[in-house]
Image (tube, rainbow, N blue to C red):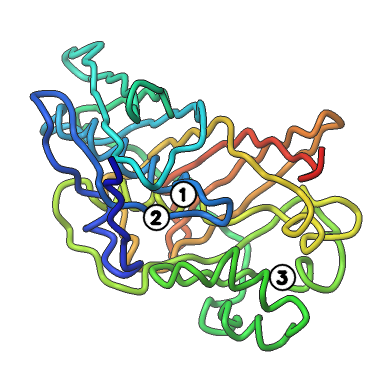
């Protein structure tokens, strides 16, 4: 049965919060479709964390690790089943299965912990970066590079919920990336409420929104968008702060390594505007020609 309900790309709360199906399972009937016609990976990450958090009240998210098993179809509802693995004095661990019909689309582990009275001194980013307000928007980049405007609209601008400002856009449009490290600013365009750990789930959503240009072949990122298939195989997030605010600008600093077998590994640190580290992530990607 076709249960697809298109999301208007505006209110992220509508996408992330799920409908109860049973004591430890929730369903999503709303979809955010990616450029390949499947459910966007950020939706699966954010909804998985939100579902797991419902079973660990009073404990904050510490880690989310997801393995994508197959592309999720936007025409069908996704059911998230949460299995409690541990409830100790300090930590709770959950396993989450994402199911469509009789097929698994994802398998994930999430951990939650009791807040400590002395969280310690957080790591900070000390280098100077251009302010996000000084950088072009994706719409402005599409106008600046009209020959690539279709690719920009398809891959990036199609998510008006996000404001993404790459710090060196020339590495995407004018030449292959000259270095492995890439940095970009991200924030939500529509304010998100502060209910529970919704901002942690929102950070999981937007953590899959950009790709490191150094993973592209020698022809550059446009060649990658047009002629290569990029699949996120494994995605892990570590949360370093209880106070994550996706309504404010977040700085993603990403380092990537591309292997000969078509696999790419990216490691990213995510900072608040004042330089405080709030999260880290790792992605294992498969990059292969579309006609292979």
Question: Which mark is first along the chain, 3 or 2?
Answer: 2
Which residue is rendered at x = 58% and y = 77% of the image? Answer: 138
Which residue was labeled with disc 3?
Answer: 168
Number of numbered tags placed on the structure image: 3
Q: Which mark is residue 40?
A: 1
Q: Earlier in the sequence, mark 2 or mark 1?
A: 2
Q: Residue at x 47, y 44 (%)?
A: 41
Judged by depth in the image, the label closer to the viewer, 3 or 1, is 1
Q: In the rendered image, which residue does mark 2 sit on?
A: 32
Q: Is residue 151 left or right of residue 82?
A: right
Q: Is residue 29 left or right of residue 126?
A: left
Q: Distance of mark 3 from mark 1, alpha carbons?
A: 25 Å
Q: Residue at x 51, y 54 (%)?
A: 34
How far apart are the alpha carbons under marks 2 and 3? 27 Å
Horizontal and vertical percent for residue 167?
65, 70
Q: Secondary structure at mark 3?
A: loop
Q: Residue at x 49, y 33 (%)?
A: 236
Where is residue 285 drawn, in percent x and y? 66, 36
């Amino acid at each position: 049965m076709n249960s697809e309900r298109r999301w208007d790309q505006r209110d992220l709360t509508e996408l992330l919060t799920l409908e109860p199906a049973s004591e430890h399972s929730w369903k999503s009937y709303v979809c955010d479709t990616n450029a390949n016609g499947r459910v966007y990976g950020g939706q699966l990450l954010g909804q998985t964390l939100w579902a797991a958090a419902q079973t660990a009240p009073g404990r904050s998210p510490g880690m989310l690790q997801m393995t994508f098993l197959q592309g999720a179809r936007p025409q069908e509802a996704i059911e998230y089943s949460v299995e409690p693995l541990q409830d100790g004095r300090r930590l709770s661990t959950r396993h989450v299965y994402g199911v469509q019909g009789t097929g698994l689309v994802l398998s994930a582990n999430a951990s939650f912990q009791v807040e400590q009275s002395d969280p310690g001194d957080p790591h900070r980013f000390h280098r100077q970066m251009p302010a996000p307000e000084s950088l072009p928007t994706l719409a402005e980049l599409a106008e600046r590079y009209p020959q690539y405007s279709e690719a920009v609209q398809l891959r990036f601008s199609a998510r008006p919920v996000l404001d993404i400002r790459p710090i060196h856009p020339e590495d995407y449009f004018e030449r292959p990336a000259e270095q492995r490290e890439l940095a970009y600013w991200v924030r939500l365009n529509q304010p998100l409420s502060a209910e529970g750990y919704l901002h942690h789930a929102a950070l999981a959503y937007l953590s899959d929104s950009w790709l490191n240009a150094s993973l592209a072949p020698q022809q550059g990122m446009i060649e990658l968008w047009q002629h290569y298939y990029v699949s996120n195989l494994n995605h892990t997030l570590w949360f370093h702060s209880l106070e994550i605010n996706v309504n404010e600008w977040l700085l993603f600093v990403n380092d990537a390594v591309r292997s000969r077998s078509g696999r790419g590994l990216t490691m990213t640190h995510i900072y608040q505007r004042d330089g405080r580290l709030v999260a880290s992530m790792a992605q294992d990607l498969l990059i292969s020609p579309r006609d292979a």
